[in-house]
Amino acid sequence: MALSGTPGVDIFPSPERVALSTNYLTNFNFANQYLPDTYEKEFERYGNRSVAGFLRMVGAEMPSTSDLIKWSEQGRLHIYNNNATSGANATADKATWTLTLPTGQTTSGFRIGQTVFISSNSTDKSNKGIIVDTAAANTIEVAYYETDGQAMAASEACSIFVYGSEFKKGSLGMSQSVEAEPNIFENKPIIIKDAYEVSGSDMAQIGWIEVTTENGATGYLWYLKSEHETRQRFDDYLETAMLETVPAVAGSGAVDEAGVYGSDGVFYVVSTRGNVFDGSPTTLSEFDTVVQRLDKQGAIEENVLFVNRAMSFDIDDMLAAQNSYGTGGTSYGLFDNDETMALNLGFSGFRRGYDFYKSDWKYLNDQTMRGGTSGGGKINGLLVPAGSTNVYDQILGKNASRPFLHVRYRASEAEDRRYKTWITGSAGGARTSDLDAMEVNFLSERAVCVLGANNFVLFQD
């Protein structure tokens, strides 16, 4: 059995700025002597419709005085290469290893005298050796400690890391130094706008429906509802734009036609510089792959999983399956599920190598936002590291502690563009023009900064 597709979910709001007959009953016939019973107060059938709140929970907002925001992140400390091949055959006493360097890197960082561990990427074979020559930028010559010589076959892909150094008596010191490699990232703010307009005549018209909105606005003036919904919608867009925005590629329609350049949103940054899990983990072994990836990245102790309903259930079922007494019953977890209490089948947190806290994310469930997507583009959840990290702040001129995820808005002593709103026209108290209407304008200029994107995990289809 399954839910019927008819009637479905109403997902199309009314874009009109006036009360429509499709919004409520208007079938009043004054020739009819019988008065119908009417409910004056509007029923909130969708509850709280706002999807904002994610960035307020995990981040902070800070001012910025520039069109460009830059920050530096630490690179790896130790020397490592995971794609090296030897030109020598097995049992050779020494070999020249060719290293595949990352894009833009001109030197390997390996130096003469360093001792290295070499392991095959496909078999259980390994060697230990000492570097005796670094003639080229992408090659090193290694002499092996083992009497059997090289364990791997020629051209077999291997990984190499430095574990120390060794020099003979009376020799010179290390001949080269290793410079710390800067990892500079940047982002630029975007301008977000919205507006609402109502004529002076409509402002003087009283309706029979008492309207209300999520932020507590009530009354019998319909334009109040529309204005507050515009404001609420703008508040949501301030957050969803930071999640979804992408940089415009040179030559794209956004650049050539609209003259905008986009920005690096959270989903874009994590998908390009972070970790991506295909789907959502349904078994402990699948989740262990996430933990193992975190071991290789920043190893942050506490993390928060913001998930949609399906992934939330997947995690609950995954954890419930670990209880040997839960088969066919409901005794898993720490819940005292007796007959006199409500049955709790959910988990809010667990520990598996690290601490993970699970939270439902309304944005991923809302049918008119990410919850309405399926297949390509469907996002099931986002793992966000808790806490903060140290970065160099150009405004302060020193290292400062910043949340992994935070928003920078344009502001100075003369102009604050964090959240601007102003009224124009000649109605509703405005006296700025001869337009017989009230125009409410909204504007913000902001960008999101994702520090340490390698610690984030995006769960998507």
Image (cartoon, grey):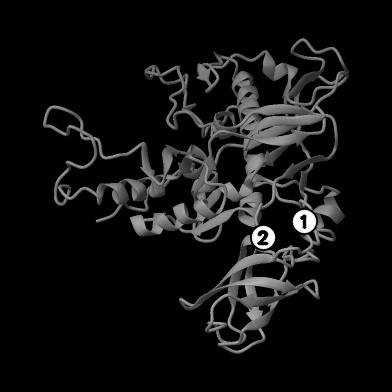
State yes or no: discs 2 and 1 in contact (Cβ < 8 Å). Answer: yes
Farthest residue in the front direction?
170
Whether residue 412 sits left or right of residue 139 in the image: it is: right
Residue 171: x and y, percent? 76, 64
Numbered label attached to residue 415:
none
* Rendered residue at 72%/69% (across/down): 101
Front residue of 442 and 175:
175
Q: Secondary structure at mark 2?
A: loop
- Residue marked by disc 1: 178
Depicted 447 relative to depicted 278: above or below: above
Farthest residue in the bottom direction?
89
Whether residue 339 sits left or right of residue 290 in the image: it is: left
Front residue of 371 and 460:
460
Asked where in the image residue 230 lies, by quadrant, the reply is top right
* Rendered residue at 54%/42% (across/down): 384
- Residue marked by disc 2: 79
Q: How far is the residue under mark 2 from the one under mark 1?
A: 10 Å
